[in-house]
Image (spheres, rainbow, N blue to C red):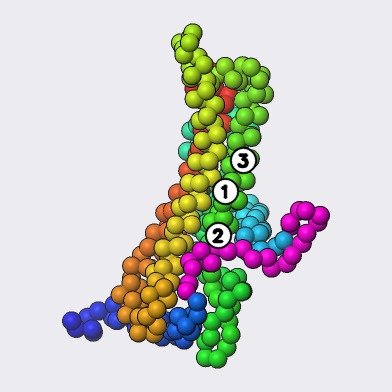
Amino acid sequence: MNLRSHPRSLLASLTTLVGVLLLAPGVASAADEPALNPSDEFALPPWISIRIGGLDLSINKAVFYVVVATILTCVVMIYAARRMATRPSGRLQVVLEGAFGLMRDNITRGNMDSKMAAKWFPFIATLFLFIWFSNMIGYIPMPTNTHEKFSLFGLEIPSFALYAATANISVPLVLALVVWISYHVEGIRVHGPLGYVRSWVPKGVEGFMVGPILAIEALSHFVRLISLSLRLFANILAGHLLILFMAGGLVVLLGMGVFGSVILGVSTGTLAVVFFLFEIGLVATLQAFIFSTLTAIYLGGAVAEEH
């Protein structure tokens, strides 16, 4: 192959090789340590221990990422809102108006009437943006894995860690609980307690079949709680584990040291980059969209006369 005719391929190969060689000392030293457990990347040792009675309020990596995602969501949207103009004056406003249209028209209005949409749009939009920012932050290799360090030219540097708040089951579970409680409260407010339970049974179902249908519907509401939280958690966690393996975790597990780092690093570098971009561009956004859309569907269904 004539490398002069493929300057981009040559540059990509050299960049991959240089990156692997720079990180090789850390990988080699890690191979001499006890066996790597990929789940350690998602362990949550306390950074600041705070205990009040039997309540553990310690600050750990998950709390840090939740706070960062919250602050980033608020700052970006307040900044964007203050820069809005009647006529779009830049790319930022065009992008934000597109996101606003997606959240308002496709997610909210597409699954509930206009009155409900106006009431619940702020809640659903906040969910979408918080989950999206949480997912996107999770693909930035921030130096928050402070309990592990690697050596770079003799300097001990905290290990970079890919982590998202949504990769911890507690965060999606709390979000799902908020949604679950919200749509039940809305359904009871509209129909009343007994009327809301009756709305679970489709019209036309009478007699003996009411009991089994009602039991199945009641069970489905608890299944919603599990599926809503696990879908988000599992997709983000699985993506991070795959990125971890392709970024060098597999080399350490195989104990191949520097030689293995170079060979596997060069051979899987392109695949890792493609997969990383796929996770950022599709999975992170898709999971925020699905969670928000299901929230709108559940809220709209709770006030409907029948399911």
Residue 46 drawn in magenta: yes
Going 45% across and 62% down the picture, which residue do you hit? 241
Residue 56, quarter of the rendered image: bottom right
**Badge 3 density bin: few <14, some 14–19, many ≥20, Cα 10 Å:** some
Quarter of the N terminus within the rendering: bottom left
As drawn, the label of residue 209 is none
Q: Secondary structure at mark 3?
A: helix
Disc nearer the start of the sequence (2/1): 2
Q: Is residue 12 visible?
A: no
Residue range corresponding to the magenta coloring:
35-57
Q: Which residue is mark 1?
A: 172
Going 62% across and 60% down the picture, which residue do you hit? 62
Q: Which residue is mark 3?
A: 177
Question: Of all residues shown, which one is farthest toward the left?
Answer: 1
Q: Secondary structure at mark 1?
A: helix
Q: Is residue 62 left or right of residue 277?
A: right
Q: Nearer the viewer, residue 153 or 9?
A: 153
Q: CA distance from mark 1 to mark 3?
A: 9 Å
As drawn, the label of residue 164 is 2
**Badge 1 density bin: few <14, some 14–19, many ≥20, Cα 10 Å:** many
